[in-house]
Image (cartoon, rainbow, N blue to C red):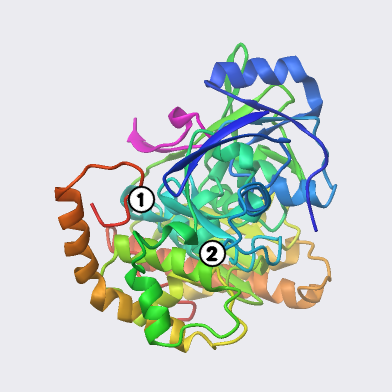
Amino acid sequence: MKLTMRVNGASYSREIEPRLLLVHFLRDELRLTGTHWGCDTSNCGACVVWLDETPVKSCTVLAAMADGHRVRTVEGLGRDGQLDPVQQGFVQCHGLQCGFCTPGMMLTARWLLDRNPDPSAEEIREALSGQICRCTGYENIVRSVRWASEHDGEKQSAADREAAGAGDDDHMPDVPA
Amino acid sequence: MQVPAHVEYEKATSVEHALALLVRYGPDARILAGGHSLIPMMKLRLVQPETLIDINGLSDLSFITETGGELRIGALTRHAQLLESPAAGRHFAILHDAEKVIADPIVRNWGTIGGSLCQADPSEDLSAAFAALKASMVIRHPDGSRTVPAREFHTGPYETVVGPAELLAEIRIAIRPGGGSAYQKVARRVGDWPVGAACAAIWLDGDTIADAGIGLAAVGARHFAAAEAEEFLHGATATEASFARAGQIAAEHCTPSSDQRGPADYKRHLASELTTRALRLALRRAQRPGAPAGMTPGRPA
């Protein structure tokens, strides 16, 4: 079947088998290997990407189901060479060791902060509860997301400045409406 | 690496189109909603449909409304939407209790209510919740629709009354006065399937239980319900003693199996204790209608 989807703002069309999973489409067809392929059973959350406005586990979604939709991967988290505050938070607070779970963690964290700009540690843990990290014990991940929540305003004003400039729809909206 | 076997794929553009595709492709076609049960089953070759009919574009199957004295839930409603629905929480706290402990937030974003029910896993939480609420299921077919009680929806593990050319469209729950409900689950770890789960809905007339529904998951209860315990409660006074006895009756009439989640006698113990706890919490909520569900207290206050 022919499939067309927008990934991180760019449109892609490919001929695929309907059984192809979204995680493999992103990694193998588009070479966007930031999305990690972990447990394959929708438990670990390493493969989390956004489908339209919502994080999903891409090992349990067919690429065909994303046909005509927008997908956002970790490669689409930063903009114009600038790290998203969530990415910056993981740098500042040592939110990763091996890094395998990190892309999924960051995409879910971005989603959380868009819906809840000032989450408590408990709310962060709940939001990330479908994602497994075997290195950090989660403490630094929670700190990283808190750091991002405290620095999101800076990104917001930068995005506002940009929005006031050219209206490019080549980027996924990544700030709260 | 786990990948599904070769399969054909069709995208339905309307409920009528989905039904026409089911007719065209026959019993080896399967409806694809969130896919969070079906795709893992396909990866493991436990099911091998020839054709998938993707209904994710059918937004008219995704809704939660209060209509005609009922809460109506479209089959394509995602778990997260049910958990976030104020109407669902206000009328049936049991649904929010259950959703909080189903899988994890990301899975709940995409898994659907109808998909969970049609998967018909004997450990599935919402099947027990809808049994307790005495809900009804609206099933669409090419000539119209039919409505079946939740307790007649499942015919066995992984089997439902939904025919090859039919589609679960909607779940309806009557909103009745004096009601309270709660869900209680014990799992080995957060987001897991239950070792055992029990839930209750009661409708009070003063201190008397005018009607009661008790649902059980993962303990081998027929139709996810504890009919004998409900019968005992019918017309009884809502007391701690009657709730304890109802728990015992529920445990006596279920048939749990020992497996990797626990031994049968422990699951039977859970059926009793969790039924009593669910009734206790349902009573508190029935006496304070409109109170927020709050965090699920598992123990007596």
- The correct choice, above or below, for A59 with respect to A90 in the image is above
What amino acid type is highlighted by mark number 1? Answer: Ser
State which quarter of the image contains the C terminus of chain B. bottom left
| In magenta stretch: residue A76 | no
The chain letter for the residue carrying disc 1 is: B
Q: Secondary structure at mark 2?
A: loop
Residue B130: image tag? none
**Camera sees residue B301:** no
Residue B104: image tag? 2
Binning the other alpha carbons within 10 Å of mark 2 as few (below 14), some (14 to 19) or many (20 upward) gives many
**Residue drawn at 71 percent across, 60 percent down:** A40
How far across and how far down the image is residue A103, in percent?
Answer: 52, 68
Binning the other alpha carbons within 10 Å of mark 1 as few (below 14), some (14 to 19) or many (20 upward) gives some
**Residue drawn at 73 percent across, 52 percent down:** B40
Answer yes or no: do the residues labelled 2 and 1 have beta carbons within 8 Å?
no
**Residue drawn at 30 percent across, 60 percent down:** A115
How far across and how far down the image is residue A118, in percent?
Answer: 26, 73
Left or right of B181 on screen, residue B260: right
How far across and how far down the image is residue B207, in percent?
Answer: 37, 62
Q: Secondary structure at mark 1?
A: loop
**Both on one chain, marks 2 and 1?**
yes
Q: Nearer the viewer, mark 2 or mark 1?
A: 2
**Residue drawn at 22 percent across, 58 percent down:** A159
The quadrant holding residue B65 is top left
Q: Which residue is mark 1?
A: B85
Extreme front residue here? A81
- What's the magenta region? B56-76
How far across and how far down the image is residue B7, in percent?
Answer: 78, 33
Q: How many badges with numbers are in the image?
A: 2
What amino acid type is highlighted by mark number 2? Answer: Asp
